Amino acid sequence: MSDENDGERPLSEAEKKRLQRFERTRANRRGRKNPSIVPTDLARTSAFAPRRRGLVVDRNFQKVYAVSNQSVVEVTGRELGTQHRDGLYALFRLRAHRMEIPNPHFDPRRPQQKGFGASRPFEVLYETRTTWRTLLTAMGLTSHVNNLGTVLRTFEEIREVKFRVYRGNAKEYMQATEQGRLPNAGFSDNLLNLIDWDGVSLDSNIRVRYGEWVRQMFEMKHLISVNSDVYFRLKSDHAKSFWPYIDSQPMYTYVDEQTLGELAGRDVAAETAEKRRKFREDCRQAFDDMVRAGGLKEWSVEMLGAGRVKKARYHYVHALPRQAELPLGEPE
């Protein structure tokens, strides 16, 4: 008599955690029709400044962006802003195609290996294929040929930047760097690689291929779902910095001022009283914007502490119900 479990391999701890991440992503879809499927670290990062102008374009630019308990990302090459985040979220909204191409370096006579440098019969690539018109629509831009150059320039600027993503939290990163050590495991790569197009009419095709790190995030299902309809209705640059963090964590009902500051690339606690007041005004405008865009139903602010150590905590209620039963569309 055979055991009904014969032939079934028990899941490893890594596979169990991967399934748990996937289920959390499924549960977070919250009734969206066309969400952006975003690598987690890119949704909860401050690597995109909440502005479109006055960005540092010096190729020697280098800055570490840390969000407590979420992500540590080092950007080298130039400063990125809201327009670059818009471009990426439009691409992730249009989905990525998974491809397998023959590996010219594969030698079947060699024993199979695992990990970095492993030789396999096929290489896996991810790319988004679309038209200029569809891409402009996804970004909320007017379908006009004058906008093609703007979009292409945005993608080229993203491609010029190297992202070094560290595993672990900001505290571990600071402790390691203070001791002159390389902090934790990580990955260094460009987000975008190949960009090509077959014409300059609105219905011409454009293809954007992702870098190795983004490919690994898709393969490992390190992804979250962000309501891109709400995102592209937002007018405030700060709201676009806050919304992916808020929307990707449906069980959260509040966020502290310090975290919002980190998402905006600043240390609010170390700033002057005047700068903190201005930042709180930016936060109020951002939360109002998220309500107008249909992402939040309501919000309120609670002041904690007193005097110089007074801090703001922003409470909010999502406008959309959580619909865990809806399936998450995987990359093709």
Image (cartoon, helix red, strand yellow):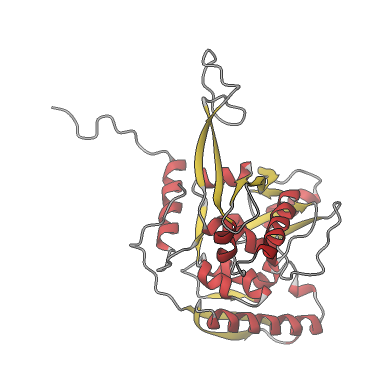
Residue at screen point 54% across, 49% down? 129
Figure label count: 0
Q: Nearer the viewer, residue 16 or 278?
A: 278
Rendered-image quadrant of the N terminus: top left
Q: Position of residue 331 (x, y in %)?
A: 47, 49
Residue at screen point 57% across, 26% down? 103
Residue at screen point 56% across, 21% down? 106
Vertical arrangement, residue 82 with respect to residue 78, above or below: below
Q: Nearer the viewer, residue 42 or 4?
A: 42
Most distant residue in the left direction:
1
Q: Work out whether residue 37 can be spotted.
A: no
Most distant residue in the top direction:
109
Vertical arrangement, residue 95 with respect to residue 101, above or below: below
* 97 relative position to 168: left or right: left
Q: Nearer the viewer, residue 40 or 227?
A: 227
Q: Position of residue 77 (x, y in %)?
A: 80, 51
Q: Position of residue 193 (x, y in %)?
A: 67, 44
Name the quadrant containing residue 186. Answer: top right
* 167 relative position to 309: left or right: left
Name the quadrant containing residue 158. Answer: bottom right
Q: Position of residue 111 (x, y in %)?
A: 52, 17
Name the quadrant containing residue 260. Answer: bottom right
Residue at screen point 43% across, 52% down? 22
Q: Work out whether residue 292 can be spotted.
A: yes
